[in-house]
Structures are given as structure tokens and as C-alpha cells.
Amino acid sequence: MHPDFSRKIIHVDMDAFYASVEQRDDPSLRGKAIAVGGRGARGVVTTASYEAREFGVRSAMSGFKARQLCPQLIFVPLRFEVYQAVSLQIRAIFERYTPLIEPLSLDEAYLDVTENDLGEPIATKVAASIRQAVYEETGLTCSAGVSYCKFLAKIASDMNKPDGLTVIRPHEARSFLEQLPVERFHGVGKVTTTRMHSLGCMTGGDLKRLSQYELAHHFGKLGRFYYHIVRGIDNRPVQPDRIRKSIGIERTLSDDLSNLADIAPILDELIDRFYERLQKANNYGRTLTLKLKTANFQILTRSCSKAYYLTQIEEIRQLAQQLLRENAHEFEQIRLLGIATSNLQEQERATGLGRQLVFDFTPPQ
Ligand code: TTP
Ligand code: MG
């Protein structure tokens, strides 16, 4: 078996996620050693700012131990709703590049960008664009890893944290994996590391000397996974985990625009790309939403719904342009234009809603 070099995978992971959000929202915390959570007798640190990490403060450490390591440590309470909101924001950014997104947690996801909405063949450029968008739109930094498989992309994203972009190219994979210490292999925990060390395996290169049989013998099912991984073979697809609730795209304009005559053609162009997306996903919605961000960053969304799925581009175009015209008095200048559809076929099929619709549809107010 040989590695499949045809795919382009990006792993994105926010830097010191909760802590960075807290430092963003409270300037007095910037540049300081902070721990999120960890207060109280039994408190546990969920994450620490990079400043605190210099003292050895880590995730999952007790607040007590953290304070011992770093007496000036500032403990900040968790604000889960805010992290969740940022998570949705970065997810929406990813969705502008590809529908193939597999979130691993609030702050981390794999993206398959083999084909992407930029039409950009160089995945490194896609990753750079994503990192820039995340920074501009959330004020937070993330790190990205780029490679031909999930395993290497994930390791890569961790290599130049924080605010890093790391690429492992196909021809570099072999020597990279051979020198990689076994504990750096994703999924290899403390127990497995000790076991590997006791078998004389310190690096990927050492691990490669064991046969598939030997690895299976020592590590069970995972042995087979290690056998392939160490040879750079990881064909696991990026699996979008959820039923999509909406499909949409948006575009930030190069200049703020106020004239309908200037905005309408841009909306038309956006709809062409939007429709291509719907066709590719083979998934259409009943609701169409126009999103406008004004020059002073106010967001306006306007929707209309139908009893049937909007599968025709001309109808989508007409509805979107109508929403734009009807709401032109709401803004002076706009800086971003977006179009989305929701109440999707796929979602309604999955929930059984689709069938019910046929019988008792009530038109929206
Ligand atoms: P991570 O991505 O593991 O860590 P991080 O983003 O804080 O730092 P970095 O990626 O730069 O190394 O986890 C993301 C968030 O998940 C983290 O900010 C807090 C939360 N978390 C916990 O609540 N408990 C934990 O044990 C860990 C590891 C993270
Ligand atoms: Mg992170």
C-alpha cells in the first residue's frame, strides 16, 4: 500500500483558545500569565495563556499547583457561551472555503481543501487566507497544518504554535515520520509511549522495523493503524459530522458600497457561486437569507421562505435581489454581502420534517 498524495488537508487549531478570548475581551489581561478556570479549592485550569505556560502551567492542572508554579497567575472564570460563539464564527469562516469540515472540538477542525471555493490549487495559500480571515474577524490567532492526510496535518498545526503555519509536503513525509519521537504520534498516550520505548522504539524509524503482526500483537487494533501511519498512509476522509443546517457564502467588498446599482451585480455574481455550491451538495433549502454588514459593522439579515425547495437559480436570484431592494433603506453603505439557504432538504429528510411538510404546511407570517 502506498500513501495517497492526491488530497489536501488543513488542520486548524486556535491558540490558547479560552485564554486568548479572555485577553481579547479584557485588555488588562493582555501580556499576562492567566489561567481560565481553576479558581476554588477543587478548581482545574482549562487552559493557560502562553505567558503562563512559560511557568509550566498547563491544561487540566489543579489551580493550586498552577499558583505554586506561577504566583502572579490571574485566574479568570469560564465564559462558555463566548467560546461557543467564536467557535461558530470560525466554523462559518471555514464554510466559505469548503463544505468538507470535520470539527474535533470548539477550537479545532480538519478541512479537506482539495477542491475549495477560492479555486486555489495551493493548500498553503488557502490556509494562509483562513488564518488571516480568522484573525481579522475574531481578533484571535490560530495555527494551521497542511499536508496530504489528517495525521500529518494535525501534527503540523502544532509545530509552530502560536500563530504558525506549517506544511509537510509529500516528499518530506517519510523522513519527517522517521525522525518523529513516538510520543508525538497522535493517539499515542503515556502508556503506549512507555511500551514502545521498552520495545526499543524511540522514533517512527524504529517503529517501522516492527512488522504489522508484531505491532498488532503489542498494541491490538491500533497496531495496524501505527503500522500504516508510520509509513505516511492515512486515508481517513474528512467527515463532516453534522447534518448541515444551512449553506451559504459571503463576500467582503473591496470598497464600501452604497448604490444599489453597484451592489446588485455583485449579488448576482455571488448567487452564481452560491448556486454552484448547492448543486455540488445536491441540497436545496426552502428559506433564503440575505446578509448585509454595514460600513459600521451592523449585521442585517433578511429572509423569505417558500413551501417548496428553492432549486431554480432564477428564482433564487429574483428573491435575493428583491430582499436587497426592499431593505435598501436600512443601510447607507455596506461592506459585506452574504447569501444563504436553510431548511434544507437533507436536514428535513433526516428529521422526518420533509414528509410532514407536504401535509400541513403553514405559510410563514
Ligand atoms: P487545546 O486546543 O488543546 O488548547 P488551547 O487552544 O488552549 O492551546 P493551544 O492549542 O495553543 O495549545 O484546547 C482548546 C480549548 O479547550 C482550551 O482553550 C480549553 C479547552 N480545554 C479544556 O477545557 N480542558 C482541557 O483539558 C483541554 C486540553 C482544553
Ligand atoms: Mg487550541
Image (cartoon, rainbow, N blue to C red):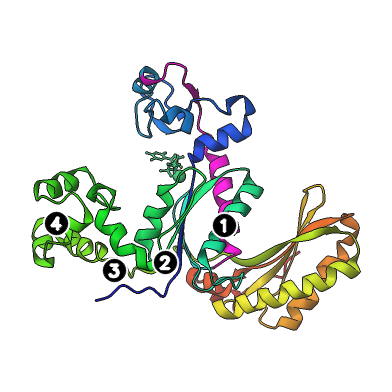
Q: Quadrant of the N terminus?
A: bottom left
Q: Amino acid type of disc 2?
A: Val
Q: Amino acid type of disc 1?
A: Ala
Q: Position of residue 336 (x, y in %)?
A: 76, 58
Answer yes or no: do the residues labelled 4 and 1 have beta carbons within 8 Å?
no
Q: Secondary structure at mark 3?
A: loop
Q: Secondary structure at mark 1?
A: helix
Q: Nearer the viewer, mark 2 or mark 1?
A: 1
- Which numbered disc flags the more N-terminal residue, 3 or 4? 4
Q: Secondary structure at mark 2?
A: loop
Q: Position of residue 260 (x, y in %)?
A: 89, 66
Q: Which residue is mark 2?
A: 238
CA distance for labels 2 and 1 = 20 Å
Answer yes or no: do the residues labelled 3 and 4 have beta carbons within 8 Å?
no
Taking the image in four quarters, ligand 1 sits in the one at top left
Q: Amino acid type of disc 3?
A: Ile
- Which numbered disc flags the more N-terminal residue, 2 or 1? 1
CA distance for labels 4 and 2 = 25 Å
Answer yes or no: do the residues labelled 2 and 1 have beta carbons within 8 Å?
no
Q: Say if 218 sits above or below 183 in the image.
A: below
Taking the spot 62% from the left edge, 24% from the top edge, the residue there is 28
Taking the spot 90% from the left edge, 54% from the top edge, the residue there is 332
Which contiguous range is marked in magenta? Answer: 69-98
Q: Which residue is mark 4?
A: 219
- Which numbered disc flags the more N-terminal residue, 1 or 3? 1
Residue 128's tag is 1
Q: Nearer the viewer, mark 4 or mark 1?
A: 1
